[in-house]
Image (cartoon, rainbow, N blue to C red):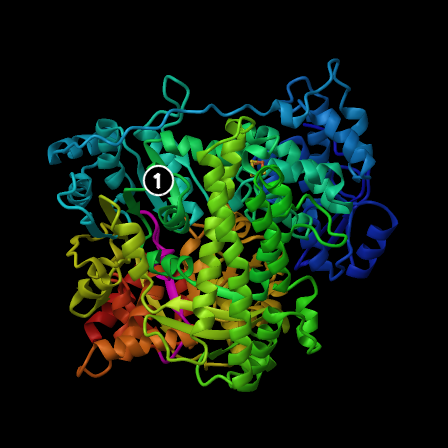
């Protein structure tokens, strides 16, 4: 084992603060100290710490800096996974895990020693590039540079620069249309048997499911009439292999591509793993049969990185850029969000450094970029065109279907797993928002850099300079668009709105929207610091007038853009000699991005055109001021489809040949069983007058003996001290392993601040979304890694946490998850009530469906495998009985006091005492 490094180390948790001086004897030398002393010590000398922002928040001292072990880890082992906790670091480095907080400083010294020893060893796998990066980091005064310098020897040959090291992608021929093949049921079954492996237990539910899935791959009989299957499969059916079996068979026979779309990154990860049973890692020609594809804003843009490395980023952000460059050389696919870049790396550097290194704003210059042939995004796009299986997410599949660059690459065989989220994904994909933040993005895309802005941002004129000088009409169109775009908001627009000094027609409109929204708000959101909104109805004359001016201003931008698109097409058709293949690709790229902006402007104009006029029954429009922690961050107009599955049906379903929506919670369930009519209505198929096939496979898990729902009857709503006390006691009773779900961030913060210290002193770490400076994916990794940890969070955790085993044994919901009473919700609820005609209670049924779906998703976190067991607690005395059908049939539901619940939780599921109690209760009832 490496010697501990001779530097002082500091650790702070909710339970206290500990410091260890260098060179202290092995069995001692660590002392507890006050937060004040710790801050003074950190100001005196650089201390070893783990996760500086987290330690800073524990000490209440935001300016803390030091020698962060996580930064060192990212440098020494780029693209390697590490849970950013003392235990996680110890596991990643093969060191002994610390038993208590007091052991952590010594662990930090040992970990630093081990990492430095790695740098000195001849077997360091990630040595290439380290010396050169270290020289740059030393110039940036990275605290670790001086410590590392003696350990990293200068290489004999000069190291290659990242941009020369990365491999180039190959241009590939277009894939022919898939063959029309029919796969028989027995073949699908045979494939499933092969995938599940010899000797695997045969599950009839899975076989029924796989046969149903196979039917969507049959040849389509009529144009615009895809095969659509809605398949509900309870947890544990093995649905992933259930659809991968026919998908792999069809892809093999037809030479086509199947897209599997997910909502969460967890499932993407799982799919990547499971697909290895059906496909090899690479084909004999080196291409990949399975590709994970994400939106371009997920990937590192090499041009942005180059700019950041060459002075575009300053201070700490420049250090981040160097560490990202280290990672890029070792990354599997350049995916920065949920790929192999540690999720915690960005949060160590606070500002939006990671986002600035991706291509967020569609500024890509395609073949005009010097790194085009090495670009991660281009590589992923090409790889997916050749793949048998593309693993993507709902939003990307929809965007690709709507405006994919290449028609041949649009998805036609699609499995939407986590299909209960398709409605929400369609809702945001097909929505329009004319807000200040969106409008300023458009201005930057057209105009380019203004004043002293840093970075490589380039406007239309710079991106298409060669076209402008060759084609006069094209040049004039660019000039006209740049001129017209001056009417869009510019930097400082939010401040000008607050001071009632808007500049230009769009800012004037935003000022009117802001004033009207504040004037009408009755939600209490102003005082609470939340966002506020109001209907786009009965609008004041000034706002309607401002909307008219704004509409004209937007049309004045759109017209020259359309002209420019026409000129680009003409240049392509009658290409000049100098236009080589990369030049053509760049113009193609520009045409694609132009079409997207022209559509956006048209959607904004349509939205403005209806202000003051009659409402369009297809849409719900509203005005909003977005706020967080009482600070405004955006203002604007919003338009959502009343039924977003209408555009989904036209854009995604209609051109497809086979589509499957599958989930454990696809249908609502009331006392009479699964509600297929509402699931079908939400699938979009009625818009094509199509009757989908349906399939149902119940979970094989024995919920009656593996889970209990406990409804606590003695915690009053709104009593925060009682709520906090209940959470603390439940966490203590189950000895951690609790997922706490809240419907309001404010309540969650209030609860966490009351109980975190008490739990930490008992050795029960508590982490919370929106409280700890850690991204949600990393929080989940931390929770999964430590069976005594508990995690508190809101919506994203209800459906995004997949933690089988002991780490999650109790889910606690603070209340019934009622839908938020937004304008959009009200409109959909009213529409649902209207559709139910004479039948009373349509609006309530609509709400009940939403709540039951949320409860079912939250409950679904608890039992992930046959061996899992646990309690699901709702801290709400007013839990309506009609919602209980959300839980799987057979799950015991017990209403009881907190005291009684604590006893049950402490005894654990499956204990003899609990089974006896439960049997007695059943007999009594
Ligand atoms: S091709 Fe586009 S996305 Fe790729 S590195 Fe260049 S500018 Fe960035």
SS type, badge 1: helix
- In the image, taking residue 231 as reference, residue 406 lies left or right, namely right
User: Which residue bears the numbered disc 1?
Assistant: 407
Q: Toward which corner of the image does residue 821 lie, by quadrant?
A: bottom left
Q: Is residue 828 magenta?
A: no
Up the image or down, 817 lies above or below 862; here it is below
Q: Is residue 199 visible?
A: no
Residue sitting at 31 percent across and 71 percent down? Answer: 894
**Image position, residue 893 (x, y; %):** 29, 69
Q: Nearer the viewer, residue 421 or 751?
A: 421
How far from the left and from the top, in percent, is residue 118? Answer: 68, 25
Which residue is at 39% across, 61% downward?
907
- Label 1, ligand 1: CB separation under 8 Å: no
Specify start and end residues of the magenta stretch as a single range: 858-878
Quarter of the N terminus within the rendering = top right
Question: Magenta stretch: dominant SS?
Answer: loop
Mark 1 closeness class: few <14, some 14–19, many ≥20 residues within 10 Å: few
Q: Nearer the viewer, residue 703 or 363?
A: 363
Q: Is residue 798 above or below residue 52?
A: below
Reply yes or no: does residue 876 show up in magenta. yes
In this orientation, does residue 797 appear?
yes
The residue located at (38%, 62%) in the rendering is 427
Q: In which quadrant of the rendered view does residue 61 lie?
A: bottom right
């Amino acid at each position: 084992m490496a010697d501990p490094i001779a530097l002082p180390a500091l650790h702070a948790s909710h339970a206290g603060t500990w410091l260890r001086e260098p060179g202290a004897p092995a069995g001692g030398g660590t002392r507890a100290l006050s937060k004040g002393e710790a801050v003074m010590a950190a100001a005196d000398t650089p201390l070893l710490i783990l996760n500086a922002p987290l330690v800073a928040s524990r000490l209440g001292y935001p300016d803390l800096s030091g020698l962060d072990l996580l930064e060192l880890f990212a440098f020494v082992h780029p693209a390697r996974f590490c849970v950013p906790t003392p235990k996680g670091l110890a596991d990643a480095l093969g060191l002994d895990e610390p038993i208590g907080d007091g052991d952590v400083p010594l662990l930090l010294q040992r970990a630093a020693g081990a990492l430095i020893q790695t740098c000195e060893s001849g077997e360091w796998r990630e040595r290439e590039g380290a010396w050169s990066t270290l020289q740059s980091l030393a110039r940036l005064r990275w605290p670790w540079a001086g410590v590392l310098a003696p350990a990293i020897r200068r290489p004999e040959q000069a190291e290659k620069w990242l941009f020369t090291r990365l491999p180039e992608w190959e241009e590939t021929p277009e894939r022919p249309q898939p063959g029309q093949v029919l796969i028989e049921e027995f073949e699908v079954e045979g494939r499933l048997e092969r995938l599940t492996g010899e000797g695997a237990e045969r599950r009839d539910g899975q076989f029924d499911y796989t046969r149903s899935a196979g039917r969507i791959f049959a040849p389509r009989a009529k144009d615009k009439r895809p095969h659509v299957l809605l398949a509900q499969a309870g947890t544990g059916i093995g649905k992933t292999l259930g659809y991968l079996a026919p998908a792999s068979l069809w892809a093999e026979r037809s030479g086509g591509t199947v897209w599997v779309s997910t909502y969460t990154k967890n499932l993407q990860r799982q799919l990547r793993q499971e697909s290895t049973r059906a496909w090899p890692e690479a084909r004999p020609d080196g291409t990949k049969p399975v590709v994970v594809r994400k939106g371009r804003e997920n990937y590192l843009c090499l041009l942005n990185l180059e700019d950041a490395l060459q002075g575009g980023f300053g201070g700490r952000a420049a250090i981040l850029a160097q560490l990202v460059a280290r990672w890029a050389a070792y990354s599997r696919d350049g995916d920065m969000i949920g790929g192999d870049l540690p999720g915690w790396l960005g949060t160590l550097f606070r500002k939006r450094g990671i986002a600035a290194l991706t291509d967020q704003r569609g500024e890509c210059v395609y073949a005009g970029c010097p790194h085009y042939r090495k670009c991660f995004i281009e590589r992923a796009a090409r790889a997916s065109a050749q793949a048998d299986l593309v693993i993507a997410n709902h939003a990307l599949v929809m965007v690709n279907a709507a405006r994919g660059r290449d028609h041949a690459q649009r998805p036609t065989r699609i499995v939407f797993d986590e299909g209960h989220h398709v409605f929400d994904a369609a809702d945001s994909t097909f929505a329009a928002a004319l807000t200040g933040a969106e409008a300023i993005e458009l201005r930057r895309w057209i105009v380019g850099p203004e004043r002293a802005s840093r970075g490589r941002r380039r406007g239309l004129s710079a991106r298409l300079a060669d076209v402008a000088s060759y084609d006069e009409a094209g040049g004039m169109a660019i000039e006209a668009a740049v001129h017209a775009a001056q009417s869009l908001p510019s930097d400082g627009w939010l401040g000008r709105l607050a001071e009632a000094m808007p500049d230009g027609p769009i800012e004037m409109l935003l000022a009117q929207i802001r004033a009207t929204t504040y004037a009408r708000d009755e939600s209490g959101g102003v005082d609470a610091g939340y966002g506020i909104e109001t209907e786009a109805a009965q609008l004041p004359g000034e706002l309607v007038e401002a909307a008219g001016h704004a509409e004209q201003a937007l049309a004045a931008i759109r017209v020259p853009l359309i002209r420019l698109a026409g000129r680009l097409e003409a240049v392509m058709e009658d290409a000049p000699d100098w236009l080589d293949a990369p030049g053509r690709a760049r113009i193609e790229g520009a045409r694609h991005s132009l079409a997207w902006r022209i559509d956006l402007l048209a959607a904004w104009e349509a939205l403005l055109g209806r202000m003051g006029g009659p409402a369009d029954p297809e849409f719900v429009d509203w005005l909003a001021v977005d706020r967080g922690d009482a600070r405004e961050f955006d203002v604007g107009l919003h338009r959502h489809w009343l039924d977003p599955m209408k555009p989904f049906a036209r854009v995604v379903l209609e051109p497809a040949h086979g589509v499957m929506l599958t989930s454990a919670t696809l249908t609502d369930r009331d006392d009479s069983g699964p509600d297929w009519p509402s699931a079908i209505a939400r699938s979009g198929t009625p818009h094509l007058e199509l009757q989908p096939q349906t399939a149902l496979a119940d979970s094989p898990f024995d919920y009656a003996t593996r889970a209990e729902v406990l409804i606590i009857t003695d915690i009053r709503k709104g009593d925060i001290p009682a709520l906090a006390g209940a959470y603390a006691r439940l966490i203590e009773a189950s000895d951690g392993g609790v997922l706490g779900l809240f419907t309001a961030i404010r309540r969650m913060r209030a609860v966490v601040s009351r109980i975190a210290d008490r739990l930490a002193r008992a050795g029960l770490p508590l982490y919370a979304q929106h409280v700890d400076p850690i991204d949600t994916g990393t929080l989940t990794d931390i929770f999964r890694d430590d069976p005594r940890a508990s995690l508190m969070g809101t919506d994203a955790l209800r459906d995004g946490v997949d933690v089988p085993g002991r780490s999650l044994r109790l889910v606690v919901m603070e209340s019934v998850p009622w839908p938020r009473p937004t304008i959009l919700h009200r409109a959909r609820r009213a529409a649902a009530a209207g559709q139910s005609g004479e039948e009373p209670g349509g609006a309530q049924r609509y709400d009940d469906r939403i709540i039951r779906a949320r409860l079912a998703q939250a409950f679904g976190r608890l039992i992930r495998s046959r061996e899992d067991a646990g309690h699901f607690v709702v801290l709400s005395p007013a839990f309506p009985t009609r919602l209980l059908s959300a839980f799987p049939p057979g799950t015991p539901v017990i209403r009881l006091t907190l005291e009684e619940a604590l006893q049950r939780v402490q005894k654990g599921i499956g204990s003899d005492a609990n089974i006896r109690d439960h049997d007695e209760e059943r007999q009594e009832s």
